[in-house]
Amino acid sequence: MNLSVKLGTLTLPNPVTVASGTFGYGVEYAQLVDLNQLGAVVVKGIRLGPVRGNPTPRTVEVTSGLINAIGLQGPGVDGFIRKYWPFLKGLQVPTIINIWGTTVEEYAEVARRFEALDGVGALELNVSCPNIKAGGAQFGTDLKLLGQVVEACRKATRLPLITKMSPNVVSIAPYAQAAEAAGSDALSIMNSFPAMAINIETRQPRLANVTGGLTGPCIKPIAVKLVWEAAKAVKIPIIGMGGIQNAADAIEFIMAGATAVAVGTANFYEPQTALQVIAGLRQFMQQRSLGDVRELIGSAHAGG
Amino acid sequence: MPMVEQTVQIVSNERDTDQYFRLVVRAPAIAPRVQPGQFAHVRILPLKEALLRRPFSIFQVSDDTLSILYKAIGRGTEVLARMRPGEELSMIGPLGHGFTVPPPGGETPLLVAGGYGMAALYLLAQRSPQKGIAFVGGRRRVDILCEAEFRALGWDVRVTTEDGSHGEKGLVTQALLIELEQRALRRKLFACGPTPMLKAVGRLAADFNLPAELSLDEHMGCGIGVCLTCVVPIKAGGDWEYQRTCTEGPVFDARQVVWEAGV
């Protein structure tokens, strides 16, 4: 049975990855999860320098979901390379590094820094974080800026580039096409939805940042639809994500057109989820005598 | 200090006083390795729409079982309170950086607890080579938990309640202040309870120039250091940074906590 898929020149041993920001830098899960069984490890967003992050409260649990406004707290490129890279480069599966910046030049500079690092699997361009004032979603919701960021990173590195799309657009198709045209090798669809919650006792927003990004099972049907639409618009592979809790969820994304999937918020409450998805996908294929996962990709498009 | 995820079976789950419950689970991979002040992150499986695990300080351990003292106060704990022996929970533990067990002949430990904060201090009291004083406070008599267990360890237990229904009337930190005014030499404070109490203990420690370890109670997401929900401002090289209550904590040196930052 073949489970391996390709994202540009990067081959994943299986299509099940983890969503940036839900898996730390991999090492945090090492005692609970056999990381070498994953399709890839995707690390939390890195910009050039360290980032302190937003004040607390940073997350609030809502019905079948989670709203977060972490603010991309992180160690910066140098801190990441010093603290986390020695562990990650020893893994047998690819590491995808999620990067961001507040300017086009910063994205390109971070991309250059990782181009120079041996063993990186791919870069994921975060142009869609809703929780930072400068950078993030402003790039993902402006066609021109999106093209500039991807193009600048394309010039800065030969590493496969995955653009992580914002769901906060009227139609995802032109944005997907803009990223493809600018040289992106794949798309991650998608980031979190802008959202908020209010404490009715205190009459205050529940997040210090007031608004945050909604993730978890409650967003899955919306994410499946965005993957469906993007798959019709571009030829490059898509990593589908949004509320995946089990193999059935992942297979929906694959049938909608995703070549790979990412488990996100579920990592927070059930660290084994990604491994369970892989096992469930295998079983699904076995039961239907499917020899290659690629037979499932986009298969829901056949009649429509 | 490796953590494991384990399906654990409920041995008992009974009301202690008022809204407080004692849960005992069989957790052979976790219980024997628990250090004082560590916690377990529990997935309450019947809780379908609330996704996250709930963190609980580990109260007592005995062979392959461990116990938790909790207050049925929110969606998660109310569902937990209805679970019966034989039912299962998913547990990750032991987690976090706990209290420093005092060395033999070291400072006399003074424990300060608010409400069920007492639970987080029990293993420390049990494993400390020298006995000390446990100050426990609560609003009412029903908020004073596990007093008997601490007395059974041979500790001096000083109870305060805000309404005076049990022990001295007042705040636990007032009782602590009175004690420190009499004698503050070679003593170390260990505290777990609501944030205002922890701040007050931190101030007393500074005033009397005593070491203090505080167990911070913050909203938690993943419990293993990834989601960055439970961060608190901690001094770092002339400045401060957000550190994780679940990983660098929950126990921090009181001098390192920057209470006024991060707003």
Image: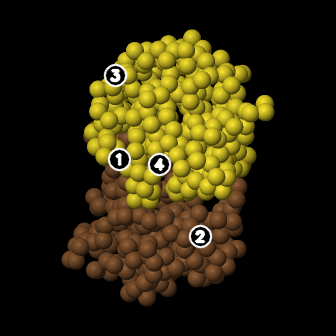
- Image quarter of residue B251: bottom left
Chain that bears disc 4: A
Identified by mark 3, the residue type is Arg
Query: SS at mark 2?
Result: strand
Q: Nearer the viewer, mark 2 or mark 4?
A: 4
**Residue drawn 55% across the image and 79% down it:** B24
Residue that protrudes farthest toward the left in the picture:
B105
Cα gap from disc 3 to disc 1, whole angstroms: 22 Å
**Residue drawn 58% across the image and 82% down it:** B11
First-in-chain label (3 vs 4):
4
Would you say the residues marked 3 and 1 are in contact, meaning their CB atoms lie under 8 Å apart?
Answer: no
**Residue drawn 58% across the image and 32% down it:** A238
The residue to which callout 1 is attached is: A91
Query: SS at mark 1?
Result: loop
Cα gap from disc 3 to disc 4, whole angstroms: 26 Å
**Could you tell me residue B211's position as x and y percent?**
29, 61
Identified by mark 4, the residue type is Leu
The residue to which callout 3 is attached is: A112
Q: Nearer the viewer, mark 1 or mark 2?
A: 1
Identified by mark 2, the residue type is Leu
Circle 3 crowding by C-alpha within 10 Å: few under 14, some 14–19, many from 20: some
On residue A38, the disc is 4
The residue to which callout 2 is attached is: B89
Circle 4 crowding by C-alpha within 10 Å: few under 14, some 14–19, many from 20: many
Q: Nearer the viewer, mark 3 or mark 4?
A: 4
Task: Confirm whether circles 3 and 1 share one chain.
Answer: yes
